[in-house]
Amino acid sequence: MTLTLSDGPLTSSGPADVNYAIDGPRHRILFGTFPRRVRAVFDGKVVVDTRRGRLLHESNLLPALYVPIDDVDTSLLRRTDHTTHCPFKGDASYWSIVTDDRTAENAVWGYEEPMEGAEWLAGHVAFYWDRLDAWFDEDEQVHGHLRDPYHRVDVRRSSAHVVVRRGDQVLAESRRPMIVSETGLPNRWYLPMADVSAPLASSTTTTHCPYKGDSTYYGLPDQPDVAWGYHEPHDDTTRIAGHVCFLADGITTDVDGRPA
C-alpha cells in the first residue's frame, strides 16, 4: 500500500514534493520479494508451499502474491479456456483447482509469455485469495491478504484533547486517546471506551484488517455503525484494545479544537 496507493511513489501520478523523476510509464510495476514461507490449502490439500513468493506492486492496486510454479502442486490444476489481457503485463492463462470433491474455477492465473518489461513474471502464478480455504504466513493463518512489507501501522499514546460530536451532542471526549497512523490513510483517533458518553451498542457488522485484526462495530439507538474497535488486536496494535474510533455521516472529531 505504501508504494502503490495514496501518495506512494508507484501511483500513477506519484507524490509531488520529491527531488527525482521516474522515467517510465504512468502505470508502474515492481516485483518485490516476500520474506517468509507462504502456504495455501484447498479442500485439505496443500496447493502452495513456498519460501520464494514475490509481491507484485502495481499502480493503484493492492500487492498480489506470485509464486514459482515449481512451488505449486500442479497435479491439482486444470487449464481452462479463460483468458484476460493486461496492457502492462500481457495475456493471462487460467487454471482451476480440482480435487475429488470440489473445484475452484479459474482460481489461478499466470503470464506464460509476459510483455516486454515484465519478463520476470514468467514461471510464476497468482491466486484469487478467497477461492482457497486457508492461507498461512509461516505457521499463522492470515485473512484478507498478506501483510505488505512496505505498509506500517504505528500506535502512539497522546494527550491531545479529542471531542467527538454529532451535531451539538458530545458522544465522547478524551485527553488520553491513542493515535493510529497507517500507511496511506488519515490518522485515526481511538478513545478509551470509558471516555465514551454515548449509549453505544455492538452491532453484527464486522470487518477484518490484516494489520489490526477483526473489528467490532457499534451503533447509536438511531444510527448504526458509528464506531468500531478491536477486542483482540494483532501484536503491533495491542494498545488499541478497549478503544473505539468514530467515523460516520454526521459525526465530527475535533483534536485540540480543530477538525481531525
Image: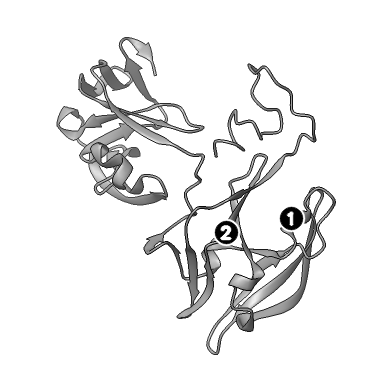
Tell me, yes or no, if residue 197 can be seen here: no
- Residue named by callout 2: 53
| Residues tagged 2 and 1 counted as in contact (Cβ below 8 A) | no
Amino acid at circle 1: Trp
- Left or right: residue 111 compared with residue 198: right
Q: Residue furthest right?
A: 116
Rendered image: mark on residue 109: none
- Residue named by callout 1: 120
Image location (x, y in percent) of residue 9? 64, 31
Image location (x, y in percent) of residue 201? 23, 43
Q: Residue at x 23, y 17 (%)?
A: 159
97 over 16 or under it: above or below: below
Image location (x, y in percent) of residue 10? 66, 35
Task: Write down the quadrant of residue 120 in the picture.
Answer: bottom right
259 over 178 or under it: above or below: above
Q: Residue at x 41, y 26 (%)?
A: 187
Distance CA(mark 2)–CA(mark 1): 13 Å
- The 10 Å Cα crowd at callout 1, few under 14, some 14 to 19, many 20 or more, is few
Quadrant of the rendering where the N terminus is positioned: top right
- Left or right: residue 247 compared with residue 117: left
Tell me, yes or no, if residue 2 can be seen here: yes
Q: Mark 2 or mark 1: which comes first in sequence?
A: 2
Task: Write down the quadrant of residue 96 in the picture.
Answer: bottom right
Q: Residue at x 19, y 34 (%)?
A: 193
Task: Write down the quadrant of residue 260 in the picture.
Answer: top left
- Left or right: residue 249 compared with residue 196: right
Q: Residue furthest top?
A: 257
Image location (x, y in percent) of residue 237? 30, 40
Q: Nearer the viewer, residue 163 or 94?
A: 94
